[in-house]
Image: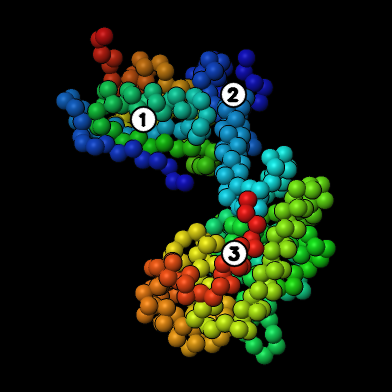
Amino acid sequence: MIPGYVPLRLAEGGPERRAIEAGQIDAVIDYASSNVILLPAARRALREAANRASAASREAAHEASIANRLLAALPHADYQRLLAGLEPLKLKLGEVLYEPGVPIRYVYFPVDCVISLRTAVEGHPPLEVGLVGHEGMVGISLALGSDVSSVQALVQATGTAMRMEAACFHKAFQQSPPLQNEVYRYACAKLALARQTVACNCFHAVEARLARWLLMTSDRVLSKKFFLTQASLGDMLGVRRATVNEAAGALQQRKLIRYSRGNIRILDRKGLEAASCRCYTRIEGLIPSA
Amino acid sequence: MSPRQHKPKAPGAAGVTTVVVLRLYIVGGAPNSVQAIANLEAICQEYLKGGHRLEVVDVLEHPARAMAEGVLVTPSLAKLSPLPAANVVGNLSDKTKVLAALGLRRRAQ
């Protein structure tokens, strides 16, 4: 049986009609509408292939999101509900995710990227007040009742993150007590971390603080090698570039790191931990583990 | 995506002195098209031994070109050279018909 939409250009009893009847044709070109018309079997096969590809992409999203510790800590059912609203995306160095005072459109769960949270003080360059990697999320203020960011969120290291629309996160948060627990635990740790950072910035030497930030960045990018410009190191520490140079030079001289044009490699992790202030172990101990 | 080109490794076997130029119109991923590519590659390997040039055109990616070249259905094989030109439609499972279009004779089994 030849489908009714086969164009009239196909001659009765011609090879094209015979091939269609034998089930050997995937598509007919309809010159009247300039369209390629897929026959049902071909349409079905292509739809199934597209479904398989989409399942593979969902699987990839699943794989990526369990690399985020906060998501990985959720019970399976809660995690599955959340997964539908999550999309993996690549975040690039220097990308601004939030500006202070601007409504939050998305929350982010980093996988192998690092997000720097910065706050501005009039007359000074922005100061880094927090670092978020695979252990947490960006956008906790949504869970705490504010839909506006109080900080600037800037991508410090390129990598993947899972993104979710603010409204979708809000709904999921209301429906999932385990998600609430994890987010509150994380928010509590971030608050303690901010307090510790304030004390650290007041009392500890630049070199020790630089060692701490380098260790924290390395923990979040899951690598001993990463890229940080002098400007971003200056923002981390709230000092000028010359001071960054001096501190990085001192760590390099002690063969703890290698630093060249923003490329940092930690050569001696134990040594760098010893050179950092004790705030590093205190701060990292505050992060909930999955 | 530009149409795929299958170029010969070396001019062919004994008896094949000219390069046979073929164009196969398909819908990528559709069952008869997948089968047509496999059938044609097997025939070319057995009878032309690399003495051919095959271009595969996906009509979903290049509908205007398929229409400009007078394609009615896919899969559809066109032998462009040497002349005379010939066409075969369907999944190319009828080896005798394909060989006839290519100007070749089926070998005795």
Q: Which mark is residue A182?
A: none
Between circles 3 and 2, the one closer to the viewer is: 3
Letter of the chain that mark 1 sits on in the rendering: B
Closer to the N terminus: mark 3 or mark 2? 2
Residue carrying label 2: A41
A203, above or below A221, in the image:
below
Residue carrying label 1: B79
**Point 46% across, 61% down: residue:** A223
**Point 79% across, 48% down: residue:** A177
Q: Nearer the viewer, residue B35 or B81?
A: B35
A235, above or below A223, in the image:
below
Between circles 1 and 3, the one closer to the viewer is: 3
Residue A138's x, y, as percent? 68, 62
Residue A277's x, y, as percent? 54, 75
A201, above or below A47, in the image:
below
Residue carrying label 3: A284
